[in-house]
Every structure is written in structure tokens, then in C-alpha cells.
Image (cartoon, helix red, strand yellow):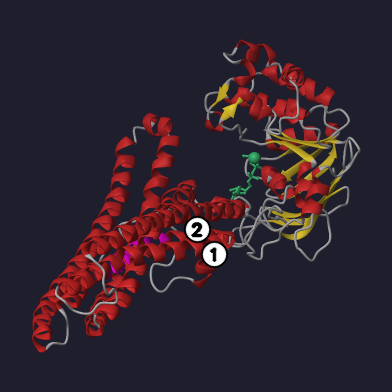
Amino acid sequence: MSKVDPRPKYLSDGDVRKEGAFNKSLFLTLRLAYQPFLIRIFIYLFVGFLGRGLLLGNTNIIGFWVDSLSGQDTPFPGFTSQDFVMVLLFMAILGFLCTFTFRVAFSRLSAKAISRLYDEVTLRTSRLPMAFFDQTPAGRIITRFSSDYGNVFRLFGGPLAEFISIIFDLTMMVILITVANPYYLIFVAFTGILNFIVYKLNQKKLRSSRRELSASRSPSIAHFAETTQGASTIRSFRREKIFGARFERLDRYFLSQKLSTTKHLMSFSLQMSSLTSLLLLVTGVSSYFMIEKGWATIGSVGVAFTFIVLSGNTVGMFFEWLTQFEEAIIGVERLDQYMRMDLEPGAHLPSFAQFPTGHPQYAPSLEQYLRHRRLTEEKSASVQFRDVWFRYRKDLPWVLKGLNFEVQAGERLGIVGRTGSGKSSLIQALFYLYDIDKGQIAINNHLPKLDEKGAGMDLNLYRQSMAFISQEPILFQGSLRFNLDIKENFSDAHIFAALERVGLKAWVQEQPGGLDMRIEERGKNLSLGERQLLCMARCLLQEAPIIIMDEATSSVDPQSEEIMVKATGEFFADRTQIIIAHRLSTLASCDRILWLQNGEIIALGPTSEVLPQFKTTELV
Ligand SMILES: Nc1ncnc2c1ncn2[C@@H]1O[C@H](COP(=O)(O)OP(=O)(O)OP(=O)(O)O)[C@@H](O)[C@H]1O
Ligand SMILES: [Mg+2]
């Protein structure tokens, strides 16, 4: 029977590799994360190493003590038992303090380094092209920033110090066994080699099952997020069972993956501990012969035997931790993948971004300059479309086909066309949210700079010159004030004045909290019309020379629409306006109308000519 992939393809995790060695760039990324702390880390490593040395060295002191009691020579001639106890006590206290300092300080720095990594990945992910967000479900991105990052943070922020302690222990043991009795080095080397072989035999299986485990989590989370968002639709269509079953299937797959990873780990752990037991037996028997032959003193055998017992365990722990860290490294690998992606053309990292990943970045002076710069000091600006060909992806059909027109400064342009004719896409293109394959769009004849070497104005500056109400009015979780005035520029009176213009002042005053009323995610606690009106108020507060409205009044009642059309007519009188509407009454006061069909311009002319033409052709 052939194996069926239990994950539906459209819900899979994307293109992370499941096999093979780690990508080298992730180690570079880790180095960058730790870079500012390197000196301190080395100091703490030294302290940690010293601490383990002092604690483990106690065993040797006890060995010498035993030898001195049985009358043999020791490096501490004339030491009484009390002296030995004092040395042991001193070493134990100092060793403990050093180990403690190392653990706490190192873990703190490590946690800081990993949160730096998180910040840098966020800076880049938020600047990826729109096409990435179109093709990647939100749940999948969230998994990278929650469970993958969580794994990395958890393991690097604590257990890493433990893991390093284990390495210190092993190194120290080799040194101390050599001091006690060099013969036993053979046993340690043998343990190491055998464990390494067992680790290597298991490594591939463990690594690929861990990668698959990480990848299997995000589809179920993505599905869960989508289901909660669409809960009302699912209920009204009575599709709970189907969605429940799909979730169960994805979740079962995740759990089976978890089970298989745990199984691999348990079997690995069992192999390791069997090895240790075997080795202990061999060491015990051979020690007896070594004392018999006079190759070792009782004290030194005691020391070596203790260390062999310890080292067997420690070597086992070392390899178990190593496999644990593979999980963290896979997390870093997945974050690193986002970090290395190309940003949206024209986007820059802010000057405070610290990892040199080769992405374009603002110089602090330019950033400062741009902060106060506007595209134009005029109230309005012109827009040029020059033979624009646009599609959402290379493998999709053209949506805009060779558009050529100009919107004059201060002009009111209405856009009409059937559903799917490309009206909203024209706005997406105007914002350069996707690549424009052929042709150019300019504002005041200025092109945005999309290529580091090219000419043109900063993309952000270009976009800031437009205020936009999208077809799906978007509000964010937070207060109403935050939604209207994200940059916190305006007084209450100013905000209320804008609300009054869209006819919402009284409504807001009635709400508990007023301007501080709570808006839920995507504004889902408001009606569509209310959302549109609030977005309009937000637009009023933004003093942009170009105002774009995509179906901004489609969901409000005729009275509200009238208020809005009048308000915008007055308020935006001297601005350039681009208005998309299905309700033709909204467009009556436009200067010109552009009629789109199938991505092409059918007509562009005075409202009194084109609107009746459109009405008779399309609306019969
Ligand atoms: N993000 C996207 N990815 C791929 N194709 C898209 C995307 N958005 C829109 N399209 C496609 O582009 C075409 C034009 O869509 P657009 O949204 O511009 O139409 P519209 O004129 O605004 O329609 P409506 O009046 O319904 O809003 C449609 O065929 C649509 O399927
Ligand atoms: Mg549209």
C-alpha cells in the first residue's frame, strides 16, 4: 500500500528542507546575535570552566586524602585531615559561586542575544513583498514567531548554559583523570567514540523527524486561526463537522509526528545508557587487576572510577542535549529563512537594524531627513500612468494591460468598471505593492526608487503622499484614538472635528470610553458602514495631497453617503481624488471618469459623457 501524505498540500508548511545538513547562514546569524556580548561571554565561560574545575577537583583532593591516610606520597605533604576538609570546603564554595555566576549571567546574555535575533527577523519579515503575505497563511508566519521562536528562546536562554557546563565537565574530567591515572584516558576515549557512533547512527533520523515536527505544527495552527475568523460563516452553513474533521486530521498528524520524535529520542536515550552500563562493568573489573598489578593506588582508582561513572553519564547527557539543541537550531534555521528573504523592492531596513544581511538600509542622516520631508508642499499632486502592465505574480494573467493616463493635480477622477475589471488592482499598482512588470507610475512625474542603484524618490515618501480608504476598511485592535491617529499628532478637538465631518461625532460620544473605546481585531465589533466612516475620518486627518477611495461609501446608508460625499467634496476640494464606486451617484461630482474593462481603458472623459455611456452599456 502506498503511503498517502496526510497533510493537504494547500495547508503544508512551505519550502523548508526536511533533510540534510544545516544551512551555513544560520550559524552566521547566531554569531551576529551574540556579537555584542562576545567579550562578556568569554569571561563568563572562563568563570564557568573554573567553577566546574573546582567542584570536580574535589574528587582528586579526596583521592589524595585517602592516599595520605594510607601512608602514600601526595602533592600535599604534611596535610592533616582538617586541612583537607578546609581545602574541600573552600573549593566547593568557590566552585559553586563561579558555576552560579556563569549559569545566571550567561543565560541572561543568551536570552538577550536571541531576542535580538527575533527583533531583526521581525524588521525584515515586516518588509517582505505583499506577494509573500498573499501566499503565506498568517498562521504559518505566526508559528515561526511563536513556537519556533519559543523553542529557540527556551533552549538558548537556559539549557545552553547547562549544555556548556557538560562540555566543561567532560574537559575537566579528562584533565583530572590524567592527573589521577593516565591509563583511564583509554576508557574515556573509548566511551566517547562509542557514544559518538550511536549519536551518528541516530542523528539523521532525529533531525528529520524534528524538522517534520516543526513543520507539522503550523498547518493546524493556520487552520485553527482561519476557523475562528470564519466561525460565523461556518456555523451558518453548518460546516462545523468538516472543519472539525480537517482540524483533527492536521492535529493527528502533528501528534503522530510528536510521538515518532519522542520514540526516536527514547530509543536513542536507551542506547546511550546501555553503553554506559557496559563500560562501567569493564572499568570495574579492570580496576581490580590494575590495583593487583600495582599500576594504580587505591586513591587514584577511586578518583578515576568516580570520573568514569560520571563521564559515562555526562557523555550520554552531552549527546542527548546535542539532539535537543538540534530542535533549537531548526528553529533558528526557520527564522533565518525569513531573515534572508528579499525585501519588497524599494524597502529599506531602519538605520537601527544591526545584522549585516545585505539588505538595503537607511543611513541615519537620510532617515532623519526623510522624517520631515514631504513629497510636495502643495495641497495636491498629479499622477501619471505610463503604459502600465500589471499582474499579481509571474504565473498569473495580466490584470492591467497597458494603462496610459494622467490625473491632474486637484482633479477628481472617478473609476468605474464591472467586478474584477481591475479597479482595486490599479490602486495596488499605484502604491507599488506588487512588481509592475512593464511601464511606470509616477506622482508629480517622480518615480519611486525601487532599486538601490536606480534614481527616484524614497518609496515611503512616495506612499505617504496618498491617503487611502480600501475596499475592506481595516481597523486595528486598540483604542479608537489609536486607530484614527496612530502617530499621536492630534488633539481630541481635532479628532472630533474629523468625526463630525463624517457624521460620527455623536455616535462616538455615546460609546463608553468615547475616543478610548475598544476596537477589536480588524474592527469586527463595528458595522461595515461604521468602519468605512471611521476610515474616512482617518483619511481626513492625514494631510495627503492625493486621496484614494475604493468603494468607501458602498456599505453606508444613503443619508450617510450624502454626508460623506458632501464632506469629502468640501474637505478635499483642493486635493487630487481618485474615487472607485459602483454606486454611480457617488461619482456625479467627479471631473472625469475612467471606465475600466478587463484591465483596459474603454473610455476616459468628462463625467457627463462617460457616466451615461457606462450606464447604458453595462447596466442594461
Ligand atoms: N491578491 C491577488 N492575487 C491574485 N489575483 C488577484 C489578487 N487580487 C485581485 N486579483 C485578481 O485581479 C483581477 C482584478 O481584481 P480587482 O480586485 O482589481 O477587481 P475590481 O475591479 O476591484 O473588482 P470589484 O469591483 O469587485 O472590487 C481579478 O480577476 C482578481 O481575481
Ligand atoms: Mg475592487
Q: Which residues are magenta?
A: 315-328
Q: Nearer the viewer, residue 418 or 527?
A: 527
Q: Which quarter of the rendered picture does the C terminus lie within? A: top right
Q: CA distance from mark 2 to mark 1?
A: 10 Å
Dot 2: element: helix
Is residue 46 among the parts visible in the rendering?
yes
Quarter of the render that holds ligand 2: top right
- Which kind of residue does numbered mark 2 sit on? Leu
Q: Secondary structure at mark 1?
A: helix
Q: Which residue is mark 2?
A: 335
**Nearest to the observer: residue 81 or residue 587:** 81
Q: Are marks 2 and 1 in contact (CB under 8 Å)?
A: yes
Q: Quadrant of residue 542?
A: top right
The structure residue drawn at horizontal position 64% and vertical position 19%, both measured from the top left corner, is 515
Q: Quadrant of residue 233?
A: top left
Q: Is residue 119 above or below residue 548?
A: below
The amino acid beneath tag 1 is Thr
- Residue 372 on the magenta span: no
Q: Which residue is mark 1?
A: 29
Give me the residue at 41% from left, 36% from top: 228
- Residue 136, image x and y in percent? 51, 52
- The residue lying toward the viewer, choosing from 103 and 490, is 103
First of labels 2, 1 by sequence position: 1
How many numbered markers are drawn?
A: 2
